[in-house]
Image (cartoon, grey):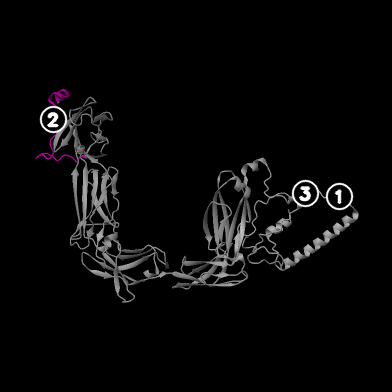
Amino acid sequence: LGAQGLCSAGPAPPAPPGVPGEAEPPTPELVEVEVGGTALLKCGPSHSQANFSHVDWFSVHKEKPTLIFRVRKGQGQSEPGEYQQRLSLQDRGTTLALSHVTPHDERVFLCQGKRPQSQEHRIQLRVYKAPEEPTIQVNPLGISVSSKEPVEVATCVGRNGYPVPQVIWYKNGHSLKEEKNRVHIQSSQIVESSGLYTLESVLNAQLVKEDKEARFYCELNYRLPSGNHMKESQEVNVQVFYPAEKVWLEVEPSGPLKEGDRVEIRCLADGNPPPHFTISKQNLSTEEMEEMTPEDNGALVFESARKEHSGLYQCQGLDLETMASLLSDPQELLVNYVSDVRVSPAAPESQEGGSLTLTCEADSNQAVQFQWLREKTGRVLEKGPVLQLHSLKREAGGGYRCVASVPSVPGLNRTRLVHVAIFGSPWMTLKERKMWVRENAVLNLSCEASGHPRPTISWSVEGTAQEQDQDPQSVLSVLSVLVTPELLRTGAECVASNSLGRNTTAIFLELASNRSTGLSTSTVSPPVRKKLPEPESKGVAIVAVTVCVLVLAVLGAVLYFFHKKGKLPCGRSGKQEITLPPSRKSEYVVEVKSDKLPEEMGLLQGSSGDQRAPGDQGEKYIDLRH
């Protein structure tokens, strides 16, 4: 027929395949494309010499051809229908392009040409789509090894693939296959509205105790035009329940324990879930195990362990499913201790120049080492339980600490502090003190003294006094007073006294305004210079000089005699006053620390024969200013 007849009569539909009495159609040409891509359908092999100016294209679905595209004189036109907007001609009309391919496009496409002679060409379109990454969901309830048949282990899901991918299950890297009464794999697929498939595969297996650490995952195998591919899920572990076969006891922390440590005794078992635990301790009197009350997790906690917690402990586990009972091996808990550190004598005291022997003892289950430290300085005085103190001075009074330690147990030590008292009259921190004040202000005056027996403090002025014990032989008194003209004139005196004597601290007060004006602040009258009468004659002058020399010689001899006999004190403040140059005799001394010296230096002493009595601190001195 001519072209016009063909147009008027319409295309003759291709003969359906498999018609009896006709030859089988040739094998279709295979074209593969991914979903969303463009399929290029060629009307015949590339070496064909056919005329493609007059061609009809058909889609064959369920062996029924449907015209979808016409080519006339090299120009194409789509037929109404599902392909109307997705078809176009390429390569001078030899190729039909199908864009935006979907899974529904997987079928046979047929082209028919009429010139120079009637011929047709079949194309099989194959569509592929890689599935999404597979997801895996483990059985949240766990699996008991006592189950007699396979139980669901995990479910694998692969979404939106085409065609349906193949699933393979793995355990610890080895593929699983169907095994009667051991492994069963059940897979199904769902066709989405898009034509893509969602695969769901369930692994059922009978597990054993050794599978508690097993790692399961699934693998999806699929094909694309580029070849075969695969995707793996994450690995999962399923909880496996099995009865305990052994129970044991653990103690934390490990290593030597000492009193005060936080100690935890924990029961453990190799079953899952763990059995119900009880903890028992051996009674030393009856040698029987007595049940204790552990916490919910089978642990017994001592927040601060004591030596009484030492002993033999044992765990018992009861499987609530099988009601089987298991016992652990007994385990010894040893809490090392050092306690009851004792020093004798408990209240040591001595006269100046005397000696003391301090002895330290302690109770422990281990070998103990002792050392003695000076409390004020932390200096180690002696290594050993006995401390000998000889030729005691007042500065030797105060705290001494015995440290009892166990070298084999790091951090295990106990101490005992003892105060050594040296008999003596009160010892003042300051002899004199000057303070700048404002009138009508409330002022706190402080005074500190030490001695044995412990001194008491009184004040020369009225006010509110508060006392604080610095140590057993020292006291600090703080007096709150109102600054008045009378107080400015008289100042204040602090008096410390005990059964062996008394001592004072003088506090002078000056208005702060005097400091800025530069006025003299001396509270001691300057020496008065008297005009001497003129000598009546040279003889009288010679006699007077001779008499003065004799008087000074006698006075010096007397002073030296009393000084050698210890009757005349020569304190630090006195020496300072005597040795002051004449130009400084009228200056006021702001603060003099005449009593309290660093204990490393000892008491201030003169020559070998210049020794003071215990209660004499030189608070009395010769004032050469008047």
Q: Is residue 117 visible?
A: no
* Residue drawn at 59 percent across, 58 percent down: 495
What residue is shown with label 2? Answer: 12
Image spot of residue 430 (x, y percent): 62, 56
Q: Quadrant of the N terminus?
A: top left
Q: Nearer the viewer, residue 536 or 336?
A: 536
Q: Which label sits on residue 534?
A: 1
Q: Which label sits on residue 110?
A: none
Q: Nearer the viewer, residue 277 or 120?
A: 277
Please tell me whether mark 2 or mark 3 is closer to you in this view: 3
First in sequence, mark 2 or 1: give its number.
2
What residue is shown with label 3? Answer: 529
Inter-mark Cα distance, 2 to 1: 171 Å
Q: Secondary structure at mark 1?
A: loop
Residue type, label 3: Arg
Image spot of residue 70 (x, y percent): 20, 28
Inter-mark Cα distance, 2 to 3: 157 Å
What segment carries the magenta color? 2-28
Q: Secondary structure at mark 2?
A: loop
Residue type, label 2: Ala
Q: Residue furthest left?
A: 20
Inter-mark Cα distance, 3 to 1: 15 Å
Determine whether 325 is above or below 100 in the image: below
Please tell me whether mark 2 or mark 1 is closer to you in this view: 1
Judge whether residue 382 is colored magenta.
no
Q: For this view, does 557 lie left or right of residue 319?
A: right
Using a 10 Å C-alpha cutoff, classify the residue at mark 3 as few (fewer than 14 neighbours), some (14 to 19) or many (20 or more).
Answer: few
Q: For this view, does 397 lie left or right of residue 72?
A: right
Judge whether residue 23 is colored magenta.
yes
First in sequence, mark 3 or 1: give its number.
3
Residue type, label 1: Glu
